Image (tube, rainbow, N blue to C red):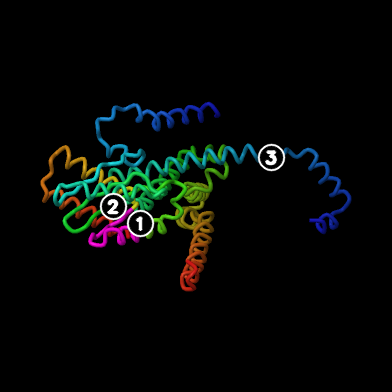
Amino acid sequence: MTSRFWKLGMVLMAFVLLPACGQDNGNESRGALLKTTNPSPLSIANGRTSHVEKIRKDISSFPEVYDVAVIKGKKETLVVYKVKHLNRFKMKGIEAKLNKFLEKRYPKENFKVSSDYKIFLEAVRLREDEEKHNLSKKEAEKRFQKIIKLKDETT
Amino acid sequence: MASKQKNLTPQQQNYQQLQQKYELKRPVLKNCIKAFFVGGLICTIGQAISYFYIYFFNFTEQTAGNPTVATMVFFAMLLTGFGVYDRIGQFGGAGSAVPVTGFGNAVISAAIEHRTEGFVLGVGGNMFKLAGSVILFGVFAAFAVALIKTLLGMWGVL
């Protein structure tokens, strides 16, 4: 009985641990849900990332937040972040704080702020596809709008 | 407890003392540790399924909970039918009963127990014999929490 449980435990552990031995083929999105990826920011509209990088740095300076992805579209700017584990009890408060900070600091921007893992994953995937497959501006904006729509559905 | 003791005859009291002497002590700490690890393992599997739905399907963190719960309950029902969940329950105790998989186990084990009484009055009538209380108190607890949250929101506390 006990040995059977040990065997079952070993098999489960193998399933959990062995994927870590796989080679990382530069796919950031593959481990984006579990690891810190810190994706570089993306500006679909004009390609200039200095402004978006500044936003990313500002958000990263918050102590409750890690792993920030920022994508700037034609109208909206998407800010997605992961919240540190013990701070996840105060998710709403953190989101409100970030919204207030961004509105004050960048009054002209239209921000969409989210801490959802799916939105983060899609943001990483978009940046990755843009880099690897050279997505056209139109296509990238279309994908970006899909993420915004998904984000709006969750709220 | 003391009043109960008073109502007993001397013979009954003697028997109780004798029974207490030979009663095996329950390994509470060991059971707690087992429950912690079994419950934790079930929750880890649940988390992995949740990530699976987020990664491969169009579910967000908020919406992935529903298919995850459905999948976990379905697996628990299958394992109960195959007789595996009973063994997990014997080993893990509350660790296997408290997560949502315990709900699936409660439904199917009642259905299996009463199948000899027929499909309608046996299986149909008794399927939610155990799980019915989970649903009732779950709905009531959700109602109470929602009421408190609404009132606190109205008073400006939250």
Could you tell me how far apart the alpha carbons at marks 2 and 1 are, in whole angstroms?
10 Å
Mark 2: give few (<14), some (14-19) or many (20+) Cα within 10 Å.
many
In the figure, is residue A143 to the left or right of A19? left
Above or below, A153 against B105 in this view is below
- Is residue A39 or residue B11 the one in the foreground? A39
Looking at the image, tell me whether mark 2 or mark 1 is earlier in sequence order.
2
**In which chain is the residue bearing label 3?**
B
Query: Is A105 in the magenta?
Result: yes
Type of the residue with mark 1:
Leu
Kindly identify which residue carries mark 2.
A79
Position in image of residue B29 (x %, y %): 64, 39
Q: Which residue lies furthest to the right in this view?
A: B10
Looking at the image, do the residues carrying marks 2 and 1 touch, with CB atoms under 8 Å apart? Answer: yes
Kindly identify which residue carries mark 3.
B26
- For numbered disc 2, what is the local secondary structure? strand
Q: Residue at x 35, y 30 (%)?
A: A20
Kindly identify which residue carries mark 1.
A98
Type of the residue with mark 2:
Val
Which-is-in-front pick, marks 2 and 3?
Answer: 2
Magenta segment, which residues? A98-114
Could you tell me how far apart the alpha carbons at marks 2 and 3 are, in whole angstroms?
53 Å
Looking at the image, do the residues carrying marks 3 and 1 touch, with CB atoms under 8 Å apart? Answer: no
